[in-house]
Amino acid sequence: MLQTTIAGSLPKPLWLAEPEKLWAPWRLEGAALEEGKRDATILAVKLQEDAGLDIVGDGEQARVHFVHGFLANLDGIDFAKKTLMGIRNNRYKAEVPTVTGPIRRKGPVHAMEAAAARAHTARKLKFTLPGPMTIVDTIADEHYGRREDLAMAFAAVLNEEAKELQALGVDIVQFDEPAFNVYMKEVSDWGVAALERAAEGLTCTTAVHICYGYGIKANIDWKATLGDSWRHYEETFPALRKSSIGQVSLECRNSRVPLDLIRLLDGKDVLAGCIDVASDAVETPEEVAETIRAVLAYVAPEKLFPCTNCGMAPMTRGVAYGKLAALAKGAALVRRELAG
Ligand code: ZN
């Protein structure tokens, strides 16, 4: 019970990419970059093990960004055709590539780092992919026209990739859908359907991560406008509860999410964010334990997975891995309490 894990991304080593940045430029190229991505993946897995996590991930070391990393090996996208677009309902602007034709997968996207991670850990391995709605919200479209049609096209290629990851020995495939906290009506209209299409036929554990974003200024400013009670999950959890997705990852630590909304996920595994990714203050194990105890009021310990609120890519490595060690220690504290 209380198996610990991460939401997804971790900071990259200084020799691989510029630090403390989203979309950080690579510092290597060609064959050296490929080898560097592989080495950084193995290192991230080992550092998560050292921190004491039960379920480890690739730390998204081989991707420039959690969405655009997946798009790198698809047909139908013109990366040279950059569009400056307001994303997450115009919360921030990003230069995004453009869909100009039918979306098809040229071949495996993440096989290298999934195989490298699998070969170097005996622990459970989670692999993250961007969810269809979040991809649609992070790319310009000149071909499909309707967001739901584009989402289904991405869901089909995500499904191909997810099945290959499963065959490589990945235990959990997680789709990241921060857009689910922005377009709540569309989540029930087509977001969950696209998510289920992406997960169709998987026999490994499936998860969806829904958060209030990385700890970057645009997100911190946005959260300041959301008032005292963040009830976005209230609109999406009922549809997710009815879905085929096994696990739901949400923010808890330092967030204004009323924890009783977790009741709406009855029957699902809950990945509760016990680590704030918008603050460099490293939680104490006792602070982590407090969050876990609060969440235990709404979910059984065998269905509760202490996690981070979101990815940690823009943080320093010292802070990020310090927080992961606190996460593992805090979970151990509560495990001992429950064991009596
Ligand atoms: Zn997130």
Image (tube, rainbow, N blue to C red):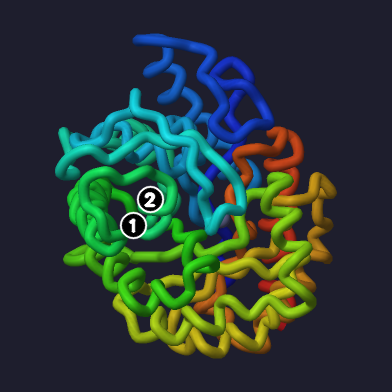
Instruction: Identify the secondary structure beneath mark 1.
Output: helix
Cβ atoms at labels 1 and 2 below 8 Å apart: yes
Res. 132 mark: 1
Instruction: Identify the secondary structure beneath mark 2.
Output: helix
Of residues 157 and 113, the one drawn nearer to the viewer in this rendering: 157
Q: CA distance from mark 1 to mark 2?
A: 5 Å
Give the image location of residue 181, x and y in percent.
54, 68
Q: Quadrant of the N terminus?
A: bottom right
Amino acid type shown at disc 2: Ile
Quadrant containing ligand 1 = bottom right
Of residues 159 and 317, the one drawn nearer to the viewer in this rendering: 159
Question: Crowdedness of circle 1 by 10 Å Cα count: few (<14), some, many (20+)?
Answer: many
Residue 338 visible in the displayed image:
no
Res. 135 mark: 2
Q: Quadrant of residue 201?
A: bottom left
Give the image location of residue 113, x and y in percent.
36, 33
Q: Quadrant of residue 233?
A: bottom right
Which residue: 42% across, 43% down? 67
Question: Crowdedness of circle 2 by 10 Å Cα count: few (<14), some, many (20+)?
Answer: many
Which residue: 58% across, 29% down? 12
Give the image location of residue 4, x and y in percent.
58, 60
Which residue: 61% across, 53% down? 91
Residue 160 placement, left or right of 338: left
Q: Quadrant of the C terminus?
A: bottom right
Res. 218 mark: none
Which residue: 58% across, 83% down? 262
Q: Is residue 296 above or below residue 287?
A: below
Residue 42 placement, left or right of 15: left
Amino acid type shown at disc 1: Pro
Give the image location of residue 14, x and y in percent.
63, 20
Q: Is residue 94 above or below residue 230?
A: above
